[in-house]
Amino acid sequence: MYLPQPAASVSAPLLTCVAGGRPSLRVAATLLAAAMLLLPSAASTADCAPFEISGDRIEQPLAGKVGQAGAGARVAADRQRGDCVICHRLPLPEGRFHGNLGPDLRAVGLRLSPAQLRLRVAANRHLNPESIMPDYCRSDGRHQVAEDYRDHPILSAQDIEDLVAWLSGLDAAEAAP
Amino acid sequence: MRRALLLLWLLLALPGHAEPRAGQISGYHLLGEELQALQDDDFANPGMLWVDRGQRAWDAAAGASGTSCRDCHGGPERMQGLATQLPRWNSDQERLENLEGLIRNCRSARQQAEPPAYESDEMLALTTVIAHQSRGLPLAVAVDGPAADAFAAGRDAFARRRGQLDLSCADCHDRHAGARLRGETISAGMINGFPLYRLTWEGMGSRQRMIRWCNEAVRAEPLQPDTAKALALELFLAWRSRGLELESPAIRR
């Protein structure tokens, strides 16, 4: 089960750091913050990165990040981040107690491309609104979110790129017996 | 013949009818033999400790009135059946009332005492001893008449996705009941065992504690236990569990 724990990183201190120096910079940062508040659409700020869907794919890596397969395996196993084994069978030591709500992913690299995997992790409900799998890159339109997680997508762009790098390399040969 | 069958089907489908439907599976059946035996043995069931504590709390005088529950109600066995009907509509207060709410009202209005806090030992002792009097009786809440609006709100709350993980109660406990979440089987969300002893908590908890736990698990702001929304959800869950035998104090993982 997911156990609640406060989100570790909050992006709010960023502007304060920028504004810490010269007064002119502080004024610029304040103006920037005001401009961001006035933006009519919150969609781009609510996502882990802007992305464009074509068919069943997101072609471009999120925020231009380069994924690392080893880091992706850690995201998949981490209960506070991906926690993929809660629903999927995966070649991980934690996979011994995997769930079966979602498909077996031990050979997912043979059937889905990185671009297809990216959409399925980032915004799966675009493909199937009824799916139990949430959109890991999105945070808009959510209801009753606990304060610590409000306006934060479940995973960062880097986490998702790491997952895509790992998942796209999975083939049944690696699967644990 | 066909018409008679249709009529029978309609009767069975009426809300509030006390026969369990397909898909209504008490969490008891997910326990495994060992834990089922623990629940069934009143001398081993840890929840029975709260029944004993509840007996004592029932008899203890409290507040400015100097009265106990027994002074007005007689023995706790007089509460037989009550827990199967809760939450129910309180027409004076124009809101739903669950077992905790009834006790808190009685405490402050009649005994003139500080009402026990939600999930306190005293509250769990009293709710457990009262619910225990209905063990074996089918859950049968009223969801029509003045409770109809609250029932509809509870049905909506059950279906509404929430939290950072954007999951509804129905996503797991309706559409995926019986599937495995990591090593654990997802329950059908039946609430016929409360108050119950949960191994995860190493202690007793109410229906509202379980609702709160689930909300936190999907990273949602937990519902406060005495709000209209929380009580409406409890009413809907009790209706989903209608016809199942009350098991308090049940054991659950």
Image (cartoon, coloured by chain):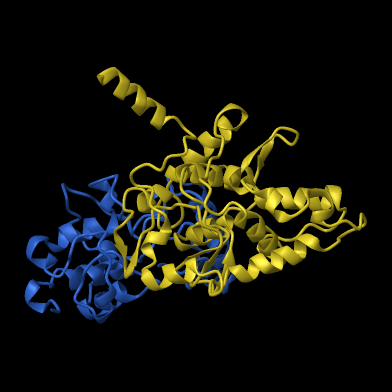
Q: Which quarter shows the N terminus of chain B?
A: top left
> Can residue A141 be seen?
yes
* Residue A137 image position (x, y, % from top left): 33, 58
* Residue A66 image position (x, y, % from top left): 23, 72
Quadrant in the picture for residue B182? bottom left
Residue shown at 61% from the left, 46% from the top = B81
Residue situated in front as seen by the camera: B140 or B224: B140
Q: Which quarter shows the C terminus of chain B?
A: bottom left
User: Which chain does the blue colour mark?
Assistant: A
Does A89 sit left or right of B124 as displayed?
A: left
Residue situated in front as seen by the camera: A53 or A37: A53
Quadrant in the picture for residue A173? bottom left
Q: Give the total number of marks visible in the rendering.
A: 0
* Residue A120 image position (x, y, % from top left): 23, 56
Residue shown at 36% from the left, 50% from the top = B171
Q: Vertically, is B107 above or below B45?
A: above
Quadrant in the picture for residue B12? top left
Does B33 sit left or right of B101 as displayed?
A: left
User: Which chain does the yellow colour mark?
Assistant: B
Q: Vertically, is A61 above or below B95?
A: below
